[in-house]
Image (spheres, rainbow, N blue to C red):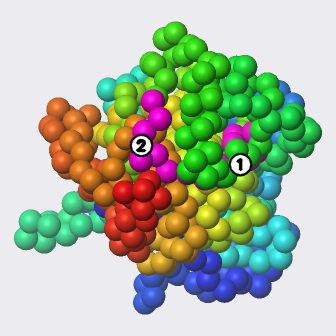
Amino acid sequence: MTCAAALALPAALPSGALAATAAHPRAGAADTSTGAPAADALPAAPPGAHTLPAADDTPGHTRSLPLPDAPAGRSSEPGEGPDERALSPREVEPFSLLGVVWDDPDAHLEGRVQVRTRSTVTGAWSGWQELESHHDDHGADRSTPEGAAGRGATAPLWVGRSDAVELRVTARDDHRHQGERTTDRLPEGLRLDLVDPGEAPALEEEPAPRPTRAGAPAATPAGLPEAAGEPAVLPELTREETLAELEAARAVEEPEAGAAGPQQRAQPYVGPRPKIVTRKGWGADEKLREKNFAYTGKVKAAFVHHSATGNNYTCAQAPSVIRGIYRYHTQSSGWRDLGYNFMVDKCGTVYEGRAGGVDKAVLGAHTLGFNSNSTGIAVLGSYSSVKPPKAAVDAVAKLTAWKLGLSGANPKGKVTLTSGGSNLYAKGKKVSLHVISGHRDGYSTECPGTRLYGQLGTARSASARLQGR
């Protein structure tokens, strides 16, 4: 299974071009599009389309388009050809990120999901792009309330500001058992979710800095990202400043009873804290997530991912990409918050992910089976065939040197974790893993992409050096 099949945008078609000559995502394969009306005659959204409500006074929304139960002229009976669904080209309200969602989180979409969109900037249509259909491995463990209440979904794809879309979903069609054909059925309740991430709210003037406990104002409960006076950016600190901050914060704060356990002691090998853009900084709408936080035990490992959202974004757009993923995870996938604990863009900027405190052991929804006692870091983009920028790899090293150092973990070491259940390791099995692992180490997937996975050795060594090891 793959975790990143999102393709780079091919050369765009002329504005309004909706003919069957559109580029197919696989060379040599026949395109199944039919002739379509010009752009100015596109149909509107189909009956049943609805918009998921946004929080009060907050820009952004998710528009949901149901897929028909069976396409006209196509059989959906087992053994009579692949099960297919499609949305013809249609104009929609502007959006920037999309994904396909279905009702049952345990149902798998075995097949191909292909989409193309029309840019609001150029008026041109993209070529066909393929969404990663196996995205259930990025998620909460099924034994948790969050995992049980979620929905099935593809990886989201960032397409940039767009106002028209065409989609086709085709089940896998295998030929097995001496010529007998077996067709996997598509999940029930398929829909296309179109996400407008909205604009980030204007930031108020920052208050004068005060002593903090590695990520929270000193006078507030430690690590609360929504606390009054939280800065938009946590500044980069030297290693000496990081240790001094931890000691100063311990002197002025008492742990909040029952929140996340005792304060973490400063470790001799903690790395310098990198600059971190907080949730306030990237414009998180805190009304979208669940109010309470969920914590795990000591952070013993970091799992590195790629977001599989494609590489067609600028670093200035990264906050919008994150707001789109956040809305997709909460409104479409049905999770309590953004799945990842941290994100890194291709320019090396680090962003706070799931709420609860950047220096705390926040329980994420990123590595099915291994969310406990770990932190999840997603590099924005798709890195199966594209080499990740050095700035991004360096940022992963800096972030892990600090985050893992808070709990004394050695980035070059190994750790034993107990599986919560994955397609590689049964629930309860004890597994030896790298302290900095790739997603594929705990689950059978290509994530974090072959090219990014190949850089994890470099990240481990650099992280350990930053810790002074």
In the image, residue 249 lies at what x, y percent? 62, 27
| Residue at horizontal 31 percent and vertical 58 percent from the top | 412
Task: Give the magenta range.
Answer: 265-283
Q: Which residue is mark 1?
A: 235
Frontmost of labels 1 and 2 is 2
Q: Disc 1 and disc 2: Cα gap in Å?
A: 21 Å
Mark 2 secondary-structure assignment: loop
In the image, residue 38 lies at what x, y percent? 79, 75
Task: Estimate how packed mark 2 is, as few (under 14), some (14 to 19) or many (20 or more) residues with alpha carbons within 10 Å.
Answer: few
Q: Is residue 145 left or right of residue 380?
A: left
In the rendered structure, which amino acid carries the disc numbered 1?
Answer: Pro
Name the quadrant containing residue 167: bottom right
Examine the rendered structure and indicate whether residue 38 appears above or below residue 432: below
Which of 164/159 is in front?
159
Q: Is residue 417 visible?
A: yes
Which of 269/52 is in front?
269
Q: Is residue 149 left or right of residue 300?
A: right
